[in-house]
Image (cartoon, rainbow, N blue to C red):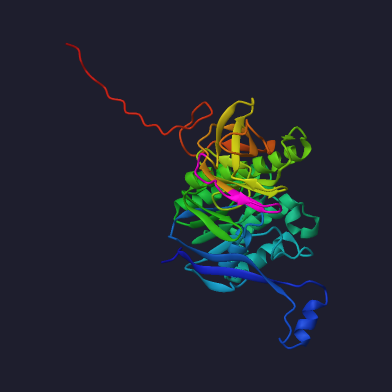
Amino acid sequence: MSGEITAAGVGKKYKRYPGRWSRLAEWLSGGRKICHEEHWVLRDITFQVQAGEAVGIIGRNGAGKSTLLKLLTRTTLPSAGTVETWGSLSALLELGMGAHMDFSGRVNAKMTCQMMGLSTEETHALLPKIAEFSELGDYFDQPMRVYSTGMQVRLAFSAATAIRPEILIVDEALSVGDAYFQHKCIERIRSFREQGTTLLFVSHDPGAVKSLCERAILIDDGVILQDGSAEAVLDYYNARIAQRSSDEEIRQVEGEDGTSTRSGTGQVRIDTVEMFAGSGQKCRAFSVGDEASIRCRIKLNQPMENPTIGILIRDRMGNDVFGINSYHLGASGMTCETGDVLEAFFSLRLNLGQGNYSLSVAVHPGDSHLIENCDWWDRCLVFQIIPGSGASFVGVASLPVTVEVNKINDHD
């Protein structure tokens, strides 16, 4: 059906060469010598867009969004999988793509119309409308090399949307235009949508995506992370952004902060402490209720019987929130020699309230560090809890809770 888009198992890879002569050496070898590494920009991208549907493509810079649009418009070919579109297609991709800067705006507009398959007569009939919508005035007949980026956007959008296509693909180029023309473009896109045009829209503006699209696809590191309603996917994406920025901020502060303290007999040494998200990646920012793990690596400087490894989480005021150790979890009873290395993993769900927390780690014999403390690393790392998708609450504990409210009419 006209207006449909299908991507099945789509992947795109590029060759990376270590030096300027590596490509030539590989070519001269006739394929016997491989000098490149394969870099996959997209992997196993599969989705379908129905006729008349509006889908937002979102993700951070470098996620693979623009590469996907180039595949859909046949600007480049996939390394794996298939891409199919049905119906007339118009696209506004990277700024200046397909334009000749020494030609005038009028000539470039003609070339755009011809690439869309329009006849010479149809093109000449549309040029006055393109000039009017772009509002370039005398610049319409000036070389594009004298255009500002905003003027290039005006020309490109006006020409690409001179007629209503069955499929319209718009990349982030609109973000460099002025607010007035952005509004004008959005109105034209909305008009096309009402007439049944299928829309693929890439933007970092969540308001524009929510306004124009009922569905969104989140791409990160070349794969689809989420595909669903625009509101739900954008909420998830914004949480990931907050988590990533918080993580970077915490690591920077930790590197500058020298307030952590160590104490103990020195019988053992806690070498490293790290936190990981449920996905297995190192992380310092988590959403409420996320799965997490803590990895502690300990080196024995002296022989030790039954070493116990404990963790303690404190809030930003230094109050104890939660503490546990391997003795109480039933993971003790080993004999260690000098030079042995222990690795302890604590897996837990972070049912904590929003805010900053610190982690302390200790190693000692028996059930408590109070008798003999071998190594206590206070505030060895800091992590942050950000709001999740659940209900808002206050406090340092996120307790499983439900509520039922009934109306009882008792006027007797």
Position in image of residue 176 (x %, y %) = 69, 48
Taking the spot 76% from the left edge, 73% from the top edge, the residue there is 17
Position in image of residue 329 (x %, y %) = 50, 42
Asked if one can make out residue 400 in the rendered structure from this viewpoint, the answer is yes
In the image, is 392 to the left or to the right of 251?
left
Taking the spot 28% from the left edge, 24% from the top edge, the residue there is 406
Taking the spot 70% from the left edge, 61% from the top edge, the residue there is 106
Taking the spot 57% from the left edge, 56% from the top edge, the residue there is 219
* Residue reaching furthest to the left: 412
- Location of residue 254 by image quarter: top right
- Viewer-nearest residue: 49 or 269: 269
- Location of residue 251 by image quarter: top right
Residue 291, compared with residue 161, is above or below; it is: above
- Viewer-nearest residue: 275 or 39: 275
In the image, is 263 to the left or to the right of 305?
right
* Figure quadrant of the C terminus: top left
Q: Is residue 329 magenta?
A: yes
Position in image of residue 46 (x %, y %) = 49, 64
The span picked out in magenta is: 328-344
Secondary structure mostly seen in the magenta stretch = loop
Position in image of residue 274 (x %, y %) = 65, 46
- Viewer-nearest residue: 221 or 207: 221
- Viewer-nearest residue: 61 or 363: 363
Q: Is residue 411 magenta?
A: no
In the image, is 336 to the left or to the right of 260?
left
Asked if one can make out residue 121 in the rendered structure from this viewpoint, the answer is no
Residue 218, compared with residue 8, is above or below; it is: above
